[in-house]
Image (cartoon, coloured by chain):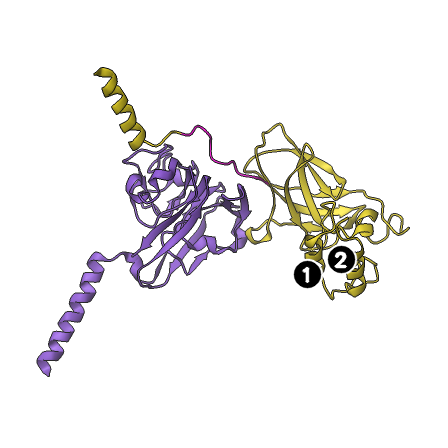
Chain colours: A purple, B yellow
Amino acid sequence: MKKYLKTTVVLAIMFVMADVAFGSVYSYGGSESITLTTAEWTVISPPTKLSDFNYTSTDITSILAYNASTGEFVDAASSDLLKEPTNAFYMLPNTNKGTAVSFVWDAYTPGSSSKELSAGWNLIGTNVIGEVINELNTIQPYVSTINVPRTLNARKSSSGSSWGSGNDNQDIAEVNWISDFLLNPRDGYWAYMTSPITYTKVLN
Amino acid sequence: MKIKSLIIGIICAATVLPVFVLAAPPQLPHLFYGDVTNGGVDVPIDTVIIAKVDGVEKGRITASVAGEYGGPNALDGKLLVQGSLSSTDVVKFYIGDNVADQEVLFSTGVVRNLDLTFNVPASGGGGGGGSYTLPAEVYATGDMNGDNIVNKFDFALMMSAWGKTGTGLAADLNSDGKVDKYDFALLMLNWGK
């Protein structure tokens, strides 16, 4: 009985360690914050499926998502669009004093996040860092162009937690589709689609 | 042989490399919020303010608070003026067919606190200085959102105001201070006009 208990404990520890070693940080509940240092538009995409995207409404002037099917920006301040990593949105702080926004996620079993893309321009994001050609491999035949919005995203601090405080173009490039360009969670991108398709990212 | 290689090369390149699209991503709207009055009096809740460029609608917002459209914070909403516009385009603001005193040049990504003033003669013989009432033609037709037709959208506005009491209610078509079955009857009389 004692031996059986010991074996069970060892197995449990091994299981937890394996999950920590190979699983994503998002497999567990948690949160992270970024600080928007200047009152300029920036483009944000949730790094994973969120339970909450927190901000102080009085510190933010506007949050806009883009409805590709109508070709219009829409007010998205209280929308669930702010919680899906396949989405991205524009955000405008109203102060240069530093505005914190935070991503909060619950522990969850592996799943997916999807977004219906329309022909034309779409605002998208990704949940893991990777080369654009890999991250968008499921929709690559339909992607004509990837455009990186040149907003606060281009001037992150080295830690990535402070946006607008770093050197210009520090870790993001204003380029169209190139194979070794890295997509980053939290950044949003414009994708020009030649036809409608569902964009899905597996969450892990 | 060279031509064959060239053709194969072009096909391979076209397969591997996506076509470069010259068109730029959509530009951000010009965003507006502020006070909105007619003859110095706050316009009522549910008043629709429409932004137009060269007579073509480029955005609209419904006042959720009397005398205000949108607000300075994220959750307040804004009037988004958007589309294929340039910095030389003049944006004008309307309630129904009535244009505001203010007009501005389009500027992408700019958020502006712009108070709008209208000087539409009050209906019902109230003259100036009284409480604000919607333009006569709006009352006559039930076209509460000012899109020149009485339809399901006006019906929706009436339903959202159903049972409300007070003065200056857009859906109070007979001006008896309450949105009720008599206003609904007026709406039906003018349906489709």
Residue A161 on the magenta segment: no
- Tell me the chain of label 1: B
Quarter assignment of residue B20: top left
For image coordinates 77% across by 56% down, the residue present is B187
The location of residue B41, given as percent across then percent down, is 79, 50
Q: Which mark is residue B171?
A: 2
> What distance separates the C-alpha of mark 2 from that of mark 1?
9 Å
Q: What is the residue that sits farthest to the bottom in this orientation?
A: A1
Residue A7 location (% of width, % of height):
11, 74
Q: Earlier in the sequence, mark 2 or mark 1?
A: 1
Q: Whole-percent x and y of residue A27?
A: 29, 60
Depth check, front residue: A20 or B3: B3
Residue B160, labelled with which disc? Answer: 1
Residue at point 33% right, 64% down? A107
**Amino acid residing under circle 2:** Ala
Q: Which residues are magenta?
A: B21-30
Dominant SS in magenta: loop
